[in-house]
Structure formats: structure tokens, C-alpha cells
Image: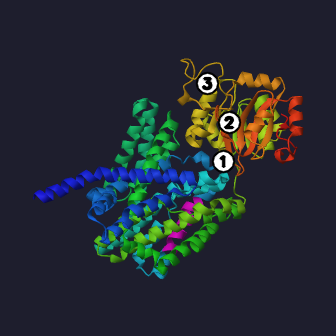
Amino acid sequence: MAAAAEIAHHTVNMLPVKIALIGALGIGAQWLAWRLQRPAIVLMAIAGLIFGPLIGYLMNLGWMPAAGHDFLEIIRLNPISDFGDVYRPMIGLAVAIILFEGGLTLRFKDLGDASSAVKRMVFVAAPIVWAAGAAAAHYIVGIPWDISVMVGGLFVVTGPTVIMPLLRQAHLKSKPANVLKWEGIVNDPLGALFAVAGFEYIRFTAMGASMSLVFGKLIFAAIFGTAIGIVSGIGLAWAFRRGHIPEYLKAPVVLAWVLFIYVMANLLADETGLLAVTALGMTMANTKFASMVEFRRFKENIAIILVSGVFVVLTATLTPEVLKGFLFNWRVWAFVFTMMFIIRPIAVMLSTRWSGLTWREALLVGWIQPRGVVAVAVAGLFAAELQALGRPEGSIFVPLAFALVFATVLAAGFTIGPVSKLLKQNAGGGDGVMIVGANPWTLGLAKALKDMGIGVLVADTNWRRLRGARLEGHATFYGEVLSENADMRLDHNAFNHIIAATPNDAYNALVCVEFAPELGRHRVFQVSTGDKDDDDGDSIAFTSRGRTLSSRGRSFDALTRDWWSGWRFSATRISEEFTIDDFFKSRVEDVDVLLIKRPDGALEFVQPGSVTKIDKGTLLSFSAKSDSNKSDAADTPRHTQAPATGLAGPASPLPG
């Protein structure tokens, strides 16, 4: 008894270690994916495989000393054993929050001219994929028809947890991007419901129930789940608008409400919870109430943590036998090939005819089809349920799910950029810059950036101030960049850096704070206050503003005064032959260094005190346009030619 108590105590103490390890692996994989610009789901899966089945395999070899075996036991993930009866409900609740957060991104106004294509993808393409996928599972994999129907229904999904990062990475044009986004989020619960339909059919027929009862129950579940989500979403938004819930409780209340709706919907009608929380998210996304932006960011943070943890957990549940089941089974890979290269493209091309999508857009949508965490989670759930009903064929669910997820994620993650460019569906952008505030200095900066081959978007609330930008041929946005209208009309694919350069320092700070969560705080810049120290009690706090623009960090008034006194922008090639030290030696007057364009095209904005770290690339500076400048340029070797203008010399002027 004492030994059993000691083992139980040891197991309980290990649970916090396992939870912390899952969090570290998931978020670590997300960070590494960001650094490497690779699909995060692949790295999360690798982490789960290493700390799950691989460590388990090493422990079973029997050659390891006791100390090493004990250490591996501590860091090994075996979720079903570690979490016990909590495992399945834990995964279900996490998937519910993920789908709710995805529903929050679906605003009907964002559909625009893609609405017809989205409807066809949901109501036409999804049933085609369901039917064809079931046939492929039966004839290729060789599983019975009833389980094949479950397989085909589940693999209708295209995971939003994978689609969203891919869209941010690829900068697609708005129409195909909207189709992919909406299809992924709407089809996720629908695919799960299709799989539930197949499972309920198997369960009820095993009990001797009639077909009319089976389908009647499923239709009721779909209607009931959608209705409860819509009604609860309207009620919650009403409570927010009326002030019945204080600001600091809004996000926690919604989080608790999502979990409550998911559980209650499942209790009242089996497996309708996912549909209910998705409808809840969509309803709140299309209902106006204050604090929506902050609330959405909170939910997005929660969803990222859950996606990271859930996928590591699901991958860690794999066993060496299951891995063999899809790595070395030609039938599994033949099924994956059929789903990717035959069924999906045909379904998309047929369903989107006369929908407003061009053949190029339809071909891109047909190719981008990554499955995500919902497919794997539901597959693992039903595999266990089928085997509990005495259907061992259900064990094929997990190998099929993982094989399809790996293949589609790898294909989409590594080819979405080249394929979108080949089909001319790339919106460009890349390292583009949005300049907020149209004035002589910023228009000169916009022209200099454009001459360096950098995309520029100039935004202002005054139509007349934008006249110069339009005459120069720059892309412009007329309106308030902080408004809800900008969320729809502003092309967010056109830039991934912001320069806020208006005379109002507080407004500049507000713009940077607004866009920092989307672009990253290291990519939002504003002109300095100049006349106040950052530690001054009257100045805007460092955490509530953007990074300081330019190496000298001068104020808007100082930059404007220098512009009218004749200062201009110039581009200079920095290399091993002409270093940054040589650049400063060739200048007899003060100079502001703004940024450097690296040889690979990446932009690096220069901060005060970091200018000496510049090594190679094209440097953009702001300085006096003097005769000494010209003589210095003439005496400099011709290898320092500035590609932005084609003129020889280290500092070829770019007149504004």
C-alpha cells in the first residue's frame, strides 16, 4: 500500500512538469516557426513526436542506465496516461475556444465580392469532398462504407489554425484570401458535424434504430447548435452595450461563456457544441460593441496557447505502431494523393464556376487545403469511440488524419508563396511601408523609398494633403487608419512596417500601439517628440508609443524645418569597400540615417545609437544637399553606385 501511495504521489507531482513542458514546446515551436518563416504546425508536430513516441521508443530499448531512464520518464509526454479521464474533455474545450476565436474573425462585411464563392465552397464543394472522400477511403484504403462516410466527412475541414498564419505569410489578394479564411473557419465545425453524422449512424444502427431517427436527430442538432450560438451571442453583445458587465470582466466573462455554451449544447444534443461556439463567435463579430479590438486580441492570445498545446499533445499520443501505420502504408498515401490532387481541385473548380472567381483564383484555392488541429483532435476522439463499439477498423482514423495533415500543411506552407506568384495572386507588399501623415517631408521619404524599390502606402485624413502622393503615383488611403472602416478598406497586405509622422505626437503613438500587435512592435515607428526626454513625466511612456524613427531621433518640427532649408534624402551603397565609417567621413554636415535595405530585400530601420552596426546594403539617409556632398560623391570609387537612382557615388541624391 505504501508503495502504491508513493507511485500515485509521484504521478501527481509530475503533472505540473508535463503541463509546463507542453507549454514550452508549443510556444517554442511557434517562436521558431516565426524565426524560420515555416509552418508552425509542422514544428509543433515534430516537438510532440520527439517528446512522445521517440522518447518512449528509446526507453523501451533497455540499454539506458537507471538515471537516464528516470530523466526520460520525467520529460516524456504520454497524454492519455498523464491526464487520464481529463484528456478527452480537455481537448474538446480547447478546440471549442479555438473555433470561437476563429468565428470572431468572420465579419460579413469582409466578404465583399467573395461572398458567392464562399457560399459555394461551403454548400457545394464540401458535400462533393465528403462524398468523394468517402469513396476514396472505401476503395483505396479498404475500410467499410459506414466508417468511410465518417472519414470523408471529417476531412472536409481546412484548418483555420493553419490557414491564418499562411495568409499572413503569403500576402494573397483579398478575394482568394477571404475565400480561404471563411472556408477554413466555417468548414471546421461542419466537418466535425459530418463525422458525427457518420458516427451516430453507426451507433444507432448498432442499437437497431431507424434511419429517420438518425437523420432527424442530426438535423435537429445542426439547427439547435446554430440557434443557441446566435441567441447567446446577441444576448452577450446586448449586455456589453448596456454596461451590465464592467470592462475588466468582459474578456473573462466571454471565455467562461464559451465554455458554458459548448458544454450545454453538447448535453442537450450530442456534438453540437462546436457548431454553437462557432455561431457564437460569428454573431459577436458582426455585432457592434465597445472594446471589441482588445477583446479579440485577448481571445487570439488564448487560442495561440491552446493551439500550440493541443497539437503537441495530440502528436505525443502517437505510438510507434500508429506511425508505421501511415509512414509505410501505401494505401494511406494513395488516399492522401487522391484527396490533394484529384478530389479537392475538382470540387473547387466545379463549385466556383460563375461565382466571380477567376480560374487562377480557383486553382489557388484548390491547392491550398491544409488540415489542422480539429481534424486530428476529432479523428483521435472517434478512433477510440469506434473501437469501444467493437469496430477495430476505426483505428485507421488516426494514421489517415496525421498523414493528410502533414502532407497538406507541408505542401501549403512551402509552396503558397511560389504558387501564388505563379498564378499572379500575390498582392505584393513584403517589406512595404505605410506612412501615416501626408506632408512635404513624408512625401519626400515616400519617393525615396519608391526609388529604392520599396512599396509605399501613404495614408491621411485630408484629401488635399494626399494630392502630392497621388501625383507621384504612390498608393494612398484616404481616411482614418484607426477606424473600423480601415479594417475593411485598408490593404493590410501592402505593408509590414509603419511610420507615423504627423505633427501630433499622441496620435502617432496611438497609431503605433494600434498596429503593433498585428505587425510586431519592432516594425512600428514614429517621429520623436524631440523636446522632451523619454523619462519626463509629461512625455508618452515608452510602452505606449512606437519606436523612434532615425538615428538622431529628431522631432517632426526639426525634420520639417530641415526639409524647407534644403535637406533631402539620398541612397548610399554600404559594402566592404565603402563602410559605414567611410560614409560618415564623406559627410561634413549632420546626417540622419533612417534605414538600410539588406541585399536580400529586408528592411532594417536604424535606431539611435545603432548606426555603427550597419555592414552591407543600401542606406537611406536625410541630410543637407550641399556642394561638398557632390564633390565627395565625385571622388568616391564607382563601385559605390546607388542602385535606387543609377547615379555613381556613395550618396546619390533622391530629390523630393
In the picture of the structure, the residue carrying the numbered disc 1 is: 493
Instruction: Indicate how the structure is coloured in the image.
Output: rainbow
Mark 3: give few (<14), some (14-19) or many (20+) Cα within 10 Å: some
Q: Amino acid at mark 2?
A: Val
Q: Amino acid at mark 3?
A: Ala
Q: Nearer the viewer, residue 268 or 319?
A: 319
Horizontal and vertical percent for residue 645? 85, 44
Comparing labels 2 and 3, the label whose residue is closer to the camera? 2
Comparing labels 2 and 1, the label whose residue is closer to the camera? 2
Element carrying mark 1: helix
In the picture of the structure, the residue carrying the numbered disc 2 is: 611
In the picture of the structure, the residue carrying the numbered disc 3 is: 506
Name the residue at 42% across, 64% down: 49
Report the Cα–Cα distance between label 2 and label 1: 29 Å
Point out the stretch of residues depicted in magenta: 119-133
Quarter the C terminus occupies:
top right
2 and 3 marks in contact (CB < 8 Å): no
Q: Nearer the viewer, residue 267 or 93?
A: 93
Quarter assignment of residue 248: top left
Q: Is residue 451 visible?
A: yes
